[in-house]
Amino acid sequence: MTDFDLIIRNADIATAADRYSADIGIRDGRIVAIAQTLSASAAEVIDACGRLVTPGGVDGHVHLDQPTSDGSVFSDDFFTGTRSAACGGTTTVIPFATQQRGHSLQDAVDDYHQRAKGKAVIDYAFHLIVSDTSPKLIQDELPRLIAEGYTSVKIYMTYDDMKLGDRQIIEVLATARKHGAMTMVHAENSDCIGWLTEQLLAAGLSAPGYHSQSRPMVVEREATHRAIALSELLDTPILIVHVSGKEAIEQIHWARGRGLPIFAETCPQYLLLSAEDLGPQNDDGAYGMRCICSPPPRDKGNQEVVWTGLANGLFTIVSSDHAPFNYGGEQGKKIAGPTAPFNLVPNGIPGVETRLPLLMSEGVLTGRIDLQRFVALTSTNPAKLYGLYPQKGTIAVGSDADLVIWEMYTPGQERQLKAEMLHSACDYTPYEGRSLRCWPAHTLSRGRTVWHDGVFTAQAGEGQFLPCLRPREPVAGSPLAKWL
Ligand code: DUC
Ligand code: ZN
Ligand code: ZN
């Protein structure tokens, strides 16, 4: 009988707060000891050889095997999507159980559990997407699901099959406040997008590049401001997801200055891609479809403001918004045909595997953000925000042994990112050809090796569902009770 199942020796540990050298002792999938030197015995020893070890990534915004309204099919299911996550150092994903209008939220949750069952290779929780706010949902279903561990709700201010009006948003925020849930908001003004799209199409401007012009920054800025105002009215926190640039950041900065509890997420596409990536880049004119996502990537100036927001603490989390659709075939980006107008192209790009290596390469190793900030943004903060901390999101005694051992490439030995290196079922990466300065050498999920030296080693179904704690205390009554 050994003391530990596994010891990781000579780890250069980085958490959101600290950096130090130690051995990590693991038993039954958990970290049970951290010491300068562990002299106990173990069934297995991994020598980290002084390499950097960070907590496994927590990706709080991932779309896997989600039903769609246009017949398009997400290229990743729970097996390929979580495999891709693991190979890029992410050990927890939170995809979305999506309510279809006219159906219950419980149906969405049941269906999503079936889709995940026997497939996920790393641990996962579910956010809820509310697209229909019947009294039954608001009064019974949502409170019950929050109590059962589905403690975050995403709402859309755009997309015809998903969007909620302000009155409906208020209903959701009131319920979130009362029951201690976190509300995630996709902030874009639907009517502005609808009108601009009609004008562009009427003028014959339908190529992928016009997607950006149909959703200019003002559209995001207005909706961001409105979401903040509704959050203030209801006295409850919100997270603005996938913030793309300066004007939305200015709104969030203003709200924070008023002491409002506004959290913000951004994604690698708003740091590394721009509207130019949607433009025509080869003969078939459809190439830009690959980078169609919403909000759209902006320009270099906006990228810089987003980088600054990472460094100065404006952003709470960096997620991938992994929403993979194949470029080839007829079920993905080209569901409406190879020359379809931009408004009929499925929105979303892959990124769950590249999130950590790109942010480490382009953020930490260029000096734009420090290592502690990197860990906070990609692991600790999402775990806290969504009620999974300290089981997930840190390296500490009692936490799950979700760990990444990094390989840093020596200068001059950088590698080029290629879609064929990745483990998603998606047939492209929008970051093709980018220089990588590092990649996870080893990913452990609850002490199991799931990725090591270029080999994926996990089995489908080894990932576990994680019920989430409430991110904050429920608040009794309405903030407007004094008027009622
Ligand atoms: N936008 C979203 O809101 N979700 C999925 C992908 C995208 O581009
Ligand atoms: Zn969204
Ligand atoms: Zn999304």
Image (tube, rainbow, N blue to C red):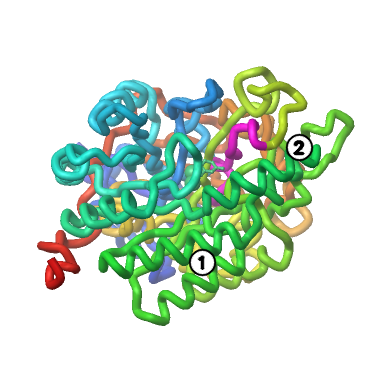
Q: Is residue 340 left or right of residue 80?
A: right
Magenta residue span: 343-357
Q: Which mark is on residue 267?
A: none
- Which amino acid, by three-letter code, is at mark 2? Ser
Q: Residue 198 falls in which quadrant of the image?
A: top right
| Magenta region includes residue 350 | yes
The residue lying toward the viewer, choosing from 40 and 113, is: 113
Q: CA distance from mark 1 to mark 2?
A: 42 Å
The residue lying toward the viewer, choosing from 423 and 75, is: 75
Number of marks in the rendered image: 2
**Residue farthest along the bottom direction in this orientation:** 257
Provide the major secondary structure of the magenta segment.
Answer: loop
Q: Which mark is on residue 206?
A: 2
| Magenta region includes residue 340 | no
Secondary element type, mark 2: loop
Q: Which residue is mark 1?
A: 371
Q: Is residue 222 left or right of residue 262?
A: right
Q: Could you tell me if residue 199 is visible in this image? A: yes
Q: Is residue 446 left or right of residue 69?
A: left
